[in-house]
Amino acid sequence: MSGTSNLIRLSVDMMGGDQGIEVTAPGLLDALSRYPDLICHAVGDPEQLHDALSASAPADRLIVVPSSEVVAMDEPPASALRFKKDSSMRVAINQLSEGRVSGCVSAGNTGALMATARFVLKTLPGIDRPAIIAVLPRSAGHVHMLDLGANVGSPPEVLFQFGLMGSSLVRTLEGAEAPTVGLLNVGSEEIKGSETIKAASEMLRNSDLNYVGYVEGDDIFNGEVDLIVCDGFEGNIALKTSEGLAQMLTKVIREEFTRSLFSKLAALIAKPVLRAFQARIDHRRYNGAMLLGLRGVVIKSHGGADRTAFSNAIGAARLAASKNLISQIESDLEATLALAD
Amino acid sequence: MSGTSNLIRLSVDMMGGDQGIEVTAPGLLDALSRYPDLICHAVGDPEQLHDALSASAPADRLIVVPSSEVVAMDEPPASALRFKKDSSMRVAINQLSEGRVSGCVSAGNTGALMATARFVLKTLPGIDRPAIIAVLPRSAGHVHMLDLGANVGSPPEVLFQFGLMGSSLVRTLEGAEAPTVGLLNVGSEEIKGSETIKAASEMLRNSDLNYVGYVEGDDIFNGEVDLIVCDGFEGNIALKTSEGLAQMLTKVIREEFTRSLFSKLAALIAKPVLRAFQARIDHRRYNGAMLLGLRGVVIKSHGGADRTAFSNAIGAARLAASKNLISQIESDLEATLALAD
């Protein structure tokens, strides 16, 4: 991909995220030490980057790419796109479009990242709108789900494209021969499905995909399907609802385990078990959503990611780049959509 | 309401739910012993009801109303409506429309219950579509949310009506002077709001309601607003996603606490704490969703409710009936919609 075989080059927006370099620098160092095949193009303020990285980074696998601006976490996408042409986010994406790296990571604001990446990289042939895809945990295994919030009111053909891209991604990244695909819907007979959902279901059923039909909200965390397709409005609400519920449960369990002397003692004894529980559902393990449907691997880290979570997002970009995900999706799309003609 | 002052009469569909009388009978007996002001019209197969209830029920507060049919849990609403005119569900609703009781409870299938209740009772003046409203827990307090799945693709004026009815309900049942109302939306700037959501927000903002604007998925369990308004598609997905996540977490925590001898010991010691945790978030406490917008109190119990959960659903109907909820909503709607002219 990047000249030297077996090495993976990624650009990393070092100024994005709620805490910027404070988190991205240690996260990047973690990733560099975890993946010996990784070369990082760290984009941001050169002086700050020098201070944060030079002491401990392997000099042959770190390239500092200077940029003079930062996209604010609450900056409107249009303003970032128009006025921040030398932002760390924009320069990191440029590195990708210029072929210097084979993937890009940012913890910056989602709207700006999507708008910029779409403008600079363009969508893949046959894809109308890029989607946000992420991995969510289950008691055993996990599920991929898209769109998690890039598009509101997706028409049937766009939902169908989500299915095509998502299925190609699961096959490529997980080696699943024919990943099962479900379409998110509501269960009550009376209201089952809008016209859009019904039409999308029809398209998925008539395709080569291993489409199993409708799934409901409880199938996200408790079901068996490999990929769940939905509009970004529902996807975002499902994702945020889960985040809120997980936070609430964590808070209540913490309150109960600190309520009395006895419960504190119980907490002490149960600590290894509670920790094992936490490790299994640790959202940091699943950090790194992909903006799927672009001509390049763009990974969005959670803005509030910590060091471990951020290094996992870099790991997600590395995996996608090393598997040549974009070419895989492109050739799958070509085959399915008969764009080859 | 029912002749004798201070007594609350409710009709109960005894044949509905996944386990029918096995659960509804003990649940009804629990409710009768918990609420001395409660009189129940138990609707169903008279012989079975006699066997299940006669030994322990207070004879002066239990009336068996015979019915010869049962609506199956997977029966299409239209078929239940057309062909099951003597079902326990239908007869229980008839009791309400005939003024014999001031509320009705069923654990039967949601679609059939909604279709039948709507057909028999009709909607309140100014209300186009009834909605499903329920209470969801927070670490402190709770939130009311509607619609949880009765309507797909609600136009702005219907979402606005949900806000009116829901606000009136929270005020009446909780004594909150001016409940805060939020409209469920997605956060990303780029995609914030469909045209429908924007128009509904405008209507809510221009009303007398204490409307605070958009809320996101994480505000359901972690926010502060008293009432969340949304279309039934998103509401149902948010609700089911939460159910699935809660089940998954319960499963993982159980697995971790039974993994080894040590973790089993830890579980033993932590048991009182885990139990306190469970009690605080026990979904059975929140059983009993209301079909709101009808000319009568109709409470839907979860089909899989156990005895405790079912008696809580009866408790929810009793509360609404005792507060004259329907007249309250009617007069609030009259005032707001100026239907009095």
Image (cartoon, coloured by chain):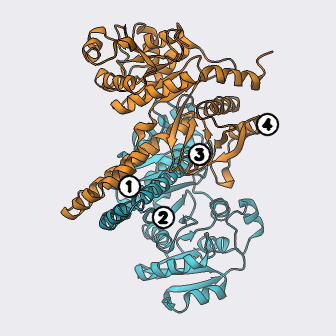
Chain colours: A orange, B cyan
Q: Nearer the viewer, mark 1 or mark 4?
A: 4
Residue toward you, A240 or A259: A259
Mark 3 or mark 2, earlier in chain = 3
Dot 2 falls on which chain? B
Residue A7, above or below A172: above
Picture disc at residue B287 = 2
Residue toward you, A122 or A341: A341
Contact flag, marks 1 and 4 (Cβ < 8 Å): no
Judge the density around disc 1: few (<14), some (14-19), many (≥20) Cα neighbours within 10 Å: some
Contact flag, marks 3 and 2 (Cβ < 8 Å): no
**Residue at 50% of width from left, 13% of height from top?**
A101
Residue A194 as seen in the image, left or right of residue A53: right
Q: Disc 1 marks which residue?
A: B142
Dot 3 falls on which chain? B
Mark 3 or mark 1, earlier in chain = 1
State how far apart marks 2 and 4 are (Cα): 40 Å
Query: Please, what is the three-letter code of the amino acid marked with disc 2?
Result: Asn
Query: Please, what is the three-letter code of the amino acid marked with disc 1?
Result: His
Residue A104 as seen in the image, left or right of residue B150: left
Residue B294 as seen in the image, left or right of residue A84: right
Mark 2 or mark 1, earlier in chain = 1
**Residue at 59% of width from left, 21% of height from top?**
A324
Quadrant of res A70: top left
Judge the density around disc 4: few (<14), some (14-19), many (≥20) Cα neighbours within 10 Å: few
Residue A279 visible at all:
yes
**Both marks 3 and 2 on one chain:** yes
Q: Nearer the viewer, mark 4 or mark 3?
A: 4
State how far apart marks 3 and 1 are (Cα): 21 Å
Q: Disc 4 marks which residue?
A: A206
Q: Disc 3 marks which residue?
A: B233
Residue A340, above or below A186: above
Q: Residue B159: where, in percent of width, then height?
A: 54, 44
